[in-house]
C-alpha cells in the first residue's frame, strides 16, 4: 500500500506531479484558453462582486491560504484576508453578504474550520470550499467548492494536499483575473501553459532528493532551525518550518526574511542552520543581502535557488536547485526540497514519520 516507499509521507511527496496533474486535468484547457470549474462558473458573479475574499483554514491549509492571498491580490486584484479558523470564529469578525469566504481543508473535517464556515453563513457570506476528501463535512457545509484531486493523504504531515490546494486556488485566481478583464489573453495563456509544465518541474525538483538527504545528515542533530523567504516564498518558509517541527520535533520557525532584523537575527550563530528560499524571481537582490547578513554572523545557510544561480551559490553552505517558473508558481517547486528535508531528518532521528507524537490527521475537536 506504500507503493514500495518506506513511509506514506515519502510516497505522497513523490505523488505530487500526478496529484497536481489530476487536480487541473479537465479544468485547465490550455489550447482552448479556458479554465472550466463548475463551482466557480455557477457562482462567478458572487466572486466578481465580492468586496473581499476571506480565507480560513488551519495548519498547512492556512499556509496554502497565504500563498493564495498573494496570488489573488496580484493576479485578480481582489482584497484578501487570511485567518486561522480558530481565531476568526471567536473574534466577532465583520462579515457581510458581500464577502466571499473560502475554507481550505484537506480532510474537510477540521472542527475550527467547520465552525468558521457556519459563522460566515449565518452572516450571509457566500462560502466556497477547497477540500480533498469527497463528501466530507466541510464539502457538504459549503455553498460551492472545488476538490483537490490529491487522492488519499495518509501521512499526518500534509504534502500533496498543500501543492494541490495551491493548484486549485491558482486556477480560481486566474479565472477571476480573466473574468475581471485584468488579464489579457496573452498573459492568461502564458499562465496556462506554464501550469501545464508544473508536474514535470516538480518531478525535476524531486531529483534533489539524494542531495537533500546529505544535507539532512549534516543538520539532523541541530536543536533549532530557521526558515526564511520573501513574497511567495514566505508561506513556503512557514510550511517548511511546520513540517520539520511536526515530524522531527526540532524547534523551527519560519519568518519573512526582512523580519530578521526585528528580532530573530539575535539567534544567529555558527550553530544555527538557516534555510533560505532565494529563487531568481521576486526580491532576489534583497534576499541575497539577507543571506550576507546571516553569513556575517556565521549562520549555516541552506539555500533553495533557481537552476543556474550564481550569486547565492558563492555565499551559501548548501545549495538546492529547483527549475525556473513564473514567480506566482514558485511555491509549487520550492516546497518540494523542504518536504524532503524534514522527511529525511525525521527518519534519521528515528521518529515516527507518518504518525508523529501528539498529532492526529484530522483535528475534529477544537
Ligand atoms: O484537514 P485540514 O487541511 O483542515 O487540516 C489542517 C491541519 O490540521 C493540517 O494541515 C496540519 O497542520 C498538518 N498536520 C500539517 O502537516
Image (tube, rainbow, N blue to C red):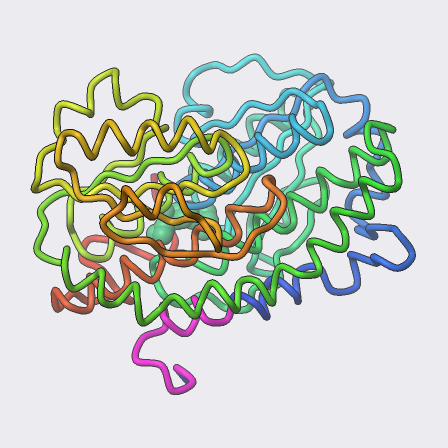
Q: In this view, does 196 lie above or below 81?
A: below
Please state, as top left, top right, bottom left or bottom right, where the N terminus lies in the image: bottom left
Decide if residue 107 is in sight here.
no
Image location of residue 90, percent across then percent down: 41, 21
Image location of residue 54, percent across then percent down: 59, 26
Q: Is residue 92 left or right of residue 37?
A: left
Decide if residue 100 is in sight here.
yes
Name the residue nearer the viewer: 52 or 11. 11
Q: In this view, does 205 lie above or below 315?
A: below
Reply yes or no: does residue 200 show up in magenta. no
- Identify the residue at horizontal 36%, vertical 65% (top origin): 155
Q: Is residue 362 left or right of residue 120?
A: left
Image location of residue 7, percent across then percent down: 31, 75
Q: Is residue 208 left or right of residue 296?
A: right
Name the residue nearer the viewer: 298 or 57. 298
Please state, as top left, top right, bottom left or bottom right, where the C terminus lies in the image: top left
- Identify the residue at horizontal 61%, vertical 57% (top origin): 148
Q: Magenta stretch?
A: 2-15
Image location of residue 223, percent across then percent down: 9, 46
Q: In this view, does 160 lie above or below 124?
A: below
Amino acid at each position: 500500500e506504500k507503493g514500495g516507499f518506506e513511509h506514506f509521507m515519502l510516497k505522497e511527496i513523490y505523488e505530487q506531479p500526478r496529484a497536481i496533474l489530476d487536480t487541473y486535468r479537465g479544468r485547465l484547457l490550455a489550447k482552448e484558453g479556458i479554465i472550466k470549474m463548475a463551482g466557480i462558473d455557477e457562482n462567478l458573479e458572487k466572486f466578481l462582486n465580492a468586496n473581499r475574499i476571506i480565507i480560513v483554514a488551519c495548519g498547512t491549509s492556512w499556509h496554502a491560504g497565504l500563498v493564495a492571498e498573494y496570488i489573488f491580490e496580484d493576479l485578480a486584484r481582489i482584497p484578501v484576508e487570511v485567518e486561522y479558523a480558530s481565531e476568526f470564529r471567536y473574534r466577532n469578525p465583520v462579515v457581510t453578504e458581500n464577502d466571499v469566504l473560502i475554507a481550505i481543508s484537506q480532510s474537510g473535517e477540521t472542527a475550527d474550520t467547520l465552525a468558521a464556515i457556519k459563522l460566515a453563513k449565518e452572516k450571509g457570506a457566500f462560502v466556497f470550499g477547497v477540500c480533498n476528501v469527497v463528501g466530507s463535512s466541510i464539502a457538504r457545509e459549503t455553498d460551492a467548492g472545488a476538490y483537490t484531486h490529491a487522492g488519499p493523504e495518509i501521512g499526518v504531515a500534509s504534502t500533496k494536499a498543500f501543492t494541490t490546494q495551491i493548484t486549485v486556488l491558482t486556477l480560481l485566481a486566474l479565472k477571476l483575473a480573466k473574468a475581471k478583464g485584468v488579464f489579457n489573453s496573452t498573459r492568461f495563456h502564458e499562465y496556462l501553459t506554464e501550469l501545464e509544465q508544473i508536474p514535470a518541474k516538480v518531478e525535476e525538483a524531486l531529483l534533489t532528493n539524494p542531495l537533500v538527504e546529505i544535507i539532512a545528515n549534516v543538520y539532523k542533530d541541530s536543536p533549532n532551525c530557521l526558515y526564511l523567504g520573501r513574497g511567495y516564498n514566505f508561506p513556503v518558509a512557514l510550511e517548511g518550518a511546520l513540517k520539520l517541527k511536526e515530524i522531527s520535533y526540532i524547534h523551527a520557525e519560519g519568518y519573512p526574511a526582512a523580519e530578521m532584523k526585528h528580532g530573530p537575527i539575535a539567534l544567529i550563530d555558527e550553530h544555527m542552520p538557516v534555510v533560505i528560499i532565494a529563487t531568481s524571481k521576486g526580491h532576489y537582490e534583497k534576499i541575497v543581502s539577507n543571506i550576507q547578513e546571516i553569513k556575517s554572523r556565521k549562520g549555516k545557510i541552506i539555500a533553495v535557488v533557481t537552476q543556474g544561480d550564481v550569486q547565492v551559490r558563492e555565499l551559501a553552505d548548501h545549495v538546492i536547485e529547483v527549475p525556473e517558473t513564473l514567480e506566482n508558481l514558485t511555491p509549487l517547486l520550492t516546497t518540494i526540497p523542504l518536504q524532503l528535508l524534514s522527511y529525511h531528518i525525521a527518519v534519521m532521528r528515528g521518529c515516527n514519520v507518518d504518525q508523529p507524537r501528539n498529532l492526529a490527521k484530522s483535528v475534529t475537536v477544537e
